[in-house]
Every structure is written in structure tokens, then in C-alpha cells.
Image (tube, rainbow, N blue to C red):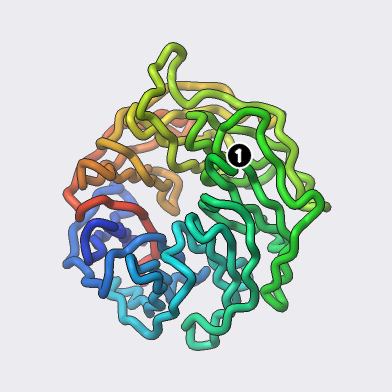
């Protein structure tokens, strides 16, 4: 099987499109896909047949049907939101599109119509400034929204997949003891742990996740850079965990590396090394087969790919490709 790999370029008006070979991980460049604005955050439904793309600076989100053979996108709708959200997420029922708003300080839930277009807004909830991402857990009953500094918080919500409603959990948010600035997060695929990458603290935090109540409680914070590193001008950006839950990665902007951690049975992280990236690795992802990692350099306008060692999680550079200006997001869709 092959996969389509899309890169949204926030400094350009197109999406870079590649075909990924499953056996080698190598990419074949396809024609760029023109957009009506600068593309930002991207999300798809579970089948990969509809893609949602934040289009800046006008605060719209386009709905696109995906031709899974050719990988081409056809716009089928557009919705005007409060502002261009930095994060989009399709809930696990494929019926609602959730969004976080960095400047407008809140989150929304929008209905997804049967044709895949974005429908009526179900709810807007105020949070705090710098809401940076939103996802539900595996059960689709709870949602979390990290906020970078100065808010320095993770908001906790109850989510109703039948109505799309979001309601504050109890407590409605938690704050790290130090000014870490949670940005994005992952949930362990098998165990009840949540991990946040902290933009301002250059750390990853580990939390116990109560899957019955939908709340988290921190128990570890670990640096993403080597001891003694000068943190001036350095921030973290993205976090991913392997499907087996054994290895976790975080991207370091300024240090320009991917940090690797092993994940213990007790959920604790152990630093295992760093791997050089393109300049300012704003986003990276693990491919659907779990064999390769792809990272984009915000300030180099290039993509670098790696082979992943399944035993120890170490990375080896595979190849590099030019993309558009200020690449922001990577999205995979399986080819049919």
C-alpha cells in the first residue's frame, strides 16, 4: 500500500503533495495543490475521504473531498470561524469538527454534515488566551485543550458524541507548578497516561489519565534538550508516540532536533537521545506503518524523512525534499 503525504505551507498558497512508498519510505513529488489562502492546520475524517484545512488569514476552514487514488483535493465547502484555528480535530464518530483558538481564547464544536461539509456551530466555550490544540480521548467522552504561556493550563472537557456538546469537567483545568506552557499532547495507546509537550518549558510532562472521570494528574516533567543547553530562543512544538507505546518523540525548535524518550511500564519517560532536523521543526509525524518519521523545517522550507529502529526508536535520515514556505502540518491518507 502507498500513502499520500500532504504538507500545508503557511507561508505559501499551496499544499505540497507526495506519494509515500510503504516498503522504502521514500517520497515521490506530485503536483502542488493550490489553495485560496495560506493553509494551516489540517484534519481528516477516519476514512481519509474528507479533509479540513484552516485557511489564513481570513479565518475560514475549507472542506475538501479526497480522491484517494490520485490524492487530488476538491473543495466542497467553506465555513467562516472566529479566527484561523491553530488546531483542528475530527471526533472519533466523524460527526463533529473541534477547533482551538489561540488569540480568541476558546474552543468550538461544529457539526459535520452528511456530505462532509462543516455545518452549524454547536457550541463556543471561552477558555484562556493561547489555546493551542484540542483532541478527544479514545472513548470520545473527554477532550483536553492545552494552553501555552501566559495561561499555562490544560482545560478538561466532557464531550457528547451524540450532540457535539462540550462541557467543563471537574476541575475545569489544571496548571503545571512551573511555567511550562503545554502546547500539544498524546495519549498512550494502551495505558492511561497522557503526555504534553511544553512550548515554553522545553519539557515533556507525563500525567496519569483517569479514564473514568476524564481528568489528568501530573507525575513527571523531563527536559527535551541536553543538560546545560542555553534555552534562549528555544521552544518545543510537536509530540508523537509510537503505536506500541514504547517510544515518544518531541520536536525542539532552536535546538533543531527530535528528542527521543523510552516509555516505561509505569509511564515514566527516560531520555534516549536527539536527532538533527531541518531548521525549526514545527511539525513532524510517524507514518501509518510505524516505520518512518517525517519532519518539516519551518525556517528551511524542507522536509526530512527518517527510518525508525523498531527496537530502540533511533532515527536515521532517509532523504530530504523542498516544500513551500513555512511548512506547518503533515497529513497522511492511504492510497486506494
Q: Residue at x 51, y 61 (%)?
A: 104
Left or right? Give the position of 248 relative to 302.
right
Q: Is residue 24 visible?
A: yes
Left or right? Give the position of 255 relative to 323.
right
Q: Residue at x 33, y 40 (%)?
A: 281
Which is more toward the observer, 149 or 113?
149
Within 10 Å of disc 1 (Cα), the crowding (few <14, some 14-19, many 20+) is many
Q: Is residue 3 above or below residue 216?
A: below
Q: Is residue 70 visible?
A: no
Left or right? Give the position of 270 relative to 31.
right
Which is more toward the observer, 289 or 155?
155
Q: Residue at x 23, y 53 (%)?
A: 27
Q: How many marks?
A: 1
Location of the N terminus (image quadrant): bottom left
Q: Is residue 220 above or below residue 3?
A: above
Residue carrying label 1? 195
Which is more toward the observer, 123 or 112?
123
Residue 174 position in % (x across, y down): 71, 42
In which quarter of the view is residue 293 placed?
Answer: top left
Q: Residue at x 59, y 57 (%)?
A: 135
Q: Is residue 106 above or below residue 291?
A: below
Location of the C terminus (image quadrant): bottom left
Amino acid at each position: 500500500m502507498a500513502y499520500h503525504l500532504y504538507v500545508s505551507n503557511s507561508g505559501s498558497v499551496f499544499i505540497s503533495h507526495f506519494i509515500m512508498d510503504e516498503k522504502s519510505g521514500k517520497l515521490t513529488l506530485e503536483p502542488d495543490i493550490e489553495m485560496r489562502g495560506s493553509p494551516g492546520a489540517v484534519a481528516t475524517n477516519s476514512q481519509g475521504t474528507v479533509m479540513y484545512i484552516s485557511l489564513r488569514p481570513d479565518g475560514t476552514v475549507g472542506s475538501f473531498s479526497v480522491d484517494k487514488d490520485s490524492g487530488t483535493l476538491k473543495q466542497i465547502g467553506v465555513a467562516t470561524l472566529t479566527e484561523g484555528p491553530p488546531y483542528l480535530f475530527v471526533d472519533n464518530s466523524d460527526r463533529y469538527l473541534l477547533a482551538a483558538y489561540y488569540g480568541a481564547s476558546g474552543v468550538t464544536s461544529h457539526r459535520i454534515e452528511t456530505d462532509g461539509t462543516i455545518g452549524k456551530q454547536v457550541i463556543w466555550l471561552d477558555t484562556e488566551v493561547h489555546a493551542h490544540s484540542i483532541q478527544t480521548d479514545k472513548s470520545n467522552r473527554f477532550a483536553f485543550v492545552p494552553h501555552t504561556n501566559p495561561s499555562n493550563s490544560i482545560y478538561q472537557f466532557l464531550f457528547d458524541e451524540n450532540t457535539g456538546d462540550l462541557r467543563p469537567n471537574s476541575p475545569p483545568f489544571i496548571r503545571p507548578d512551573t511555567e511550562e506552557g503545554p502546547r500539544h499532547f498524546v495519549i498512550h495507546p494502551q495505558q492511561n497516561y497522557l503526555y504534553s509537550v511544553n512550548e515554553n518549558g522545553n519539557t515533556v510532562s507525563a500525567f496519569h489519565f483517569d479514564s473514568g472521570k476524564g481528568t489528568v494528574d501530573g507525575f513527571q516533567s523531563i527536559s527535551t534538550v541536553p543538560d546545560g543547553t542555553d534555552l534562549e530562543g528555544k521552544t518545543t512544538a510537536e509530540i508523537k508516540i509510537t503505536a506500541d507505546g514504547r517510544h515518544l518523540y518531541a520536536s525542539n525548535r532552536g535546538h533543531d532536533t527530535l528528542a527521543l524518550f523510552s516509555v516505561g511500564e509505569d509511564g515514566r519517560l527516560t531520555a534516549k537521545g536527539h536527532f538533527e532536523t531541518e531548521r525549526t521543526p514545527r511539525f513532524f509525524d510517524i507514518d501509518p506503518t510505524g516505520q518512518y518519521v517525517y519532519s518539516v523545517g519551518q525556517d528551511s522550507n524542507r522536509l526530512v524523512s527518517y527510518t525508525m529502529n523498531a527496537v530502540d526508536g533511533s532515527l536515521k535520515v532517509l532523504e530530504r525534499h523542498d516544500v513551500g514556505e513555512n511548512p506547518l502540518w503533515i497529513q497522511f491518507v492511504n492510497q486506494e
